[in-house]
Image: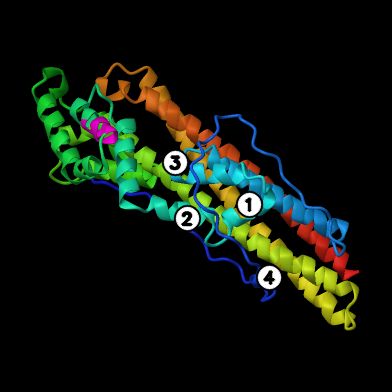
């Protein structure tokens, strides 16, 4: 089966005023704290005392909501199934005694999130992730040589992992295929209905990488063994890539949204403050209204995006739950192996769906506060 790498995509940030762009952020130094266990408490937000020119209550509430939302997003990254580089970096920001300032710097351009992404793109990190994925998706009962070779590479050096990615994986796959060909029970012809099911995955599965894996199994010149490998590890491998890609993409998009929100919200608060003592009240009022309208438009777009992600995650969860139901009652070896990974994927996508609901609710709250700000400055 062809290797398909996960990709992260991001939308462009909204326009911001020149004053907002003057925000200066520091770059977090990488540290090596371990990630917390599920459910472990993170340090609480550290708030600075109000300055003499602190914003009005409504604007202050919007700033506080944005800070809380940013912290929650970083917490989700820390406790997610994302690569260790991102999770550890997020945990470092959360445990900082500098509170919200550390969170803002982690999300800011050139901050901890960007540095972690750079480490993630390192060849050594990518090789390690590939080996980890093979261990997670290739059952020893179906691909013992491949699984053992991947585990050995993980225990070895960077050179060992590079060798496994370059040629060791293909060699181990060939060894497993030869062993299966010598076993009579694995030589039973693939049933027409099993092949038709793969064709259905190739055309209609909600996961792009699962569709690619199914299409590869049914490619011209392929045979029964290719279909068996789809059931044996190709299906699960494609599902793992789809989940990984979803997590990376949504984390990237949300980091950019929070960056933009910080700038837009700061511009709106500054414009509202300027309105208080402005000599040209009409012009200042119009500027403040436009600033809060920009926050509202950004929040509305983010909420819409998360509602779409919720729908996608829900479809994925239902698909994998359906696969589990089929596999649980199956007698065929092709299907038996799918029960546990289908259950795991179904639960993982359900968690993604729940996270999307929470993120959409956050942006809905920001939208409400932005509209309140627009009403407030309109007088």
User: Is the residue under label 1 in contact with that under label 4 (CB below 8 Å)?
Assistant: no
Say if residue 310 shows up in the picture: no
| Disc 1 packing (10 Å; few <14; some 14–19; many ≥20) | many
Q: Looking at the image, is mark 1 or mark 3 earlier in the sequence? A: 3
Q: Which mark is residue 102?
A: 1
SS at badge 1? helix
Disc 4 target residue: 20
Q: Main secondary structure of the magenta part?
A: helix
Q: Name the quadrant containing residue 277.
A: bottom right
Rounded to the nearest angstrom, the CA distance separating label 4 from label 1 is 19 Å
Residue 336 is labelled as none
> Which of the two labelled residues, at mark 4 and mark 2, occupies the earlier sequence position?
4
- Horizontal side of residue 7 vs 38, given as left or right: left
**Residue 152 on the magenta segment:** yes
**Residue 318 pos. (x, y %):** 48, 33
Q: Which mark is residue 115?
A: 2
Q: Where is 96 relative to 132, above or below?
A: below
Q: CA distance from mark 1 to mark 3?
A: 19 Å
Q: Nearer the viewer, mark 1 or mark 3?
A: 1
Please provide the residue range marked out in magenta: 149-155
Mark 3 secondary-structure assignment: helix
Judged from the image, the secondary structure of the residue bearing numbered disc 4 is helix
State the residue position of label 3.
Answer: 84
* Dot in front, 4 or 2: 2
Work out whether mark 3 precedes mark 2 in sequence or the reverse, and give the earlier one.
Answer: 3
Residue at 48% in and 46% down: 86
> In what element is the residue under mark 2?
helix
Residue 112 inside the magenta-drawn segment:
no
């Amino acid at each position: 089966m062809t290797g398909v790498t996960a990709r992260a995509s991001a939308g462009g940030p909204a326009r911001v005023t020149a004053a907002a762009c003057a925000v200066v952020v520091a770059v977090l130094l990488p540290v090596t704290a371990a990630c917390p266990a599920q459910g472990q408490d993170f340090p609480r937000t550290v708030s600075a005392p109000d300055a003499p020119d602190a914003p009005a209550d409504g604007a202050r509430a919007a700033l506080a909501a944005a800070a809380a939302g940013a912290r929650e997003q970083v917490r989700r990254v820390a406790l997610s199934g994302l690569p260790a580089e991102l999770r550890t970096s997020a945990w470092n920001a959360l445990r900082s005694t500098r509170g919200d300032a550390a969170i803002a710097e982690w999300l800011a351009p050139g901050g901890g999130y960007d540095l972690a992404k750079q480490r993630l793109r390192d060849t050594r990190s990518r090789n390690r992730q590939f080996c980890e994925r093979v261990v997670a998706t290739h059952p020893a009962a179906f691909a013992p040589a491949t699984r053992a070779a991947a585990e050995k590479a993980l225990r070895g050096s960077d050179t060992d992992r590079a060798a496994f990615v370059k040629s060791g994986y293909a060699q181990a796959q060939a060894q497993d295929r030869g062993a299966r060909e010598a076993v009579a029970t694995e030589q039973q012809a693939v049933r027409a209905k099993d092949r038709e099911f793969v064709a259905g995955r190739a055309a209609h599965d909600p996961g792009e990488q699962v569709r690619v894996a199914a299409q590869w199994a049914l490619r011209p010149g392929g045979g029964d063994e290719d279909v068996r490998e789809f059931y044996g590890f190709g299906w699960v491998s494609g599902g793992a890539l789809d989940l990984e890609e979803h997590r990376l993409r949504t984390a990237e998009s949300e980091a950019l949204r929070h960056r933009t929100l910080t700038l837009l919200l700061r511009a709106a608060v500054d414009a509202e403050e300027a309105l208080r003592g402005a000599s040209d009240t009409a012009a200042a009022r119009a500027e403040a209204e436009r600033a809060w309208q920009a926050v509202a438009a950004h929040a509305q777009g983010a909420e819409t995006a998360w509602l779409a992600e919720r729908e996608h995650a829900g479809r994925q969860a239902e698909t994998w739950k359906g696969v589990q139901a089929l596999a649980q009652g199956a007698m065929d070896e092709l299907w038996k192996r799918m029960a546990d990974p289908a259950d795991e994927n179904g639960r993982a996508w359900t968690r993604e769906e729940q996270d999307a609901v929470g993120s959409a609710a956050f942006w809905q709250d920001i939208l409400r506060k932005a509209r309140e700000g627009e009403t407030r400055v309109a007088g």
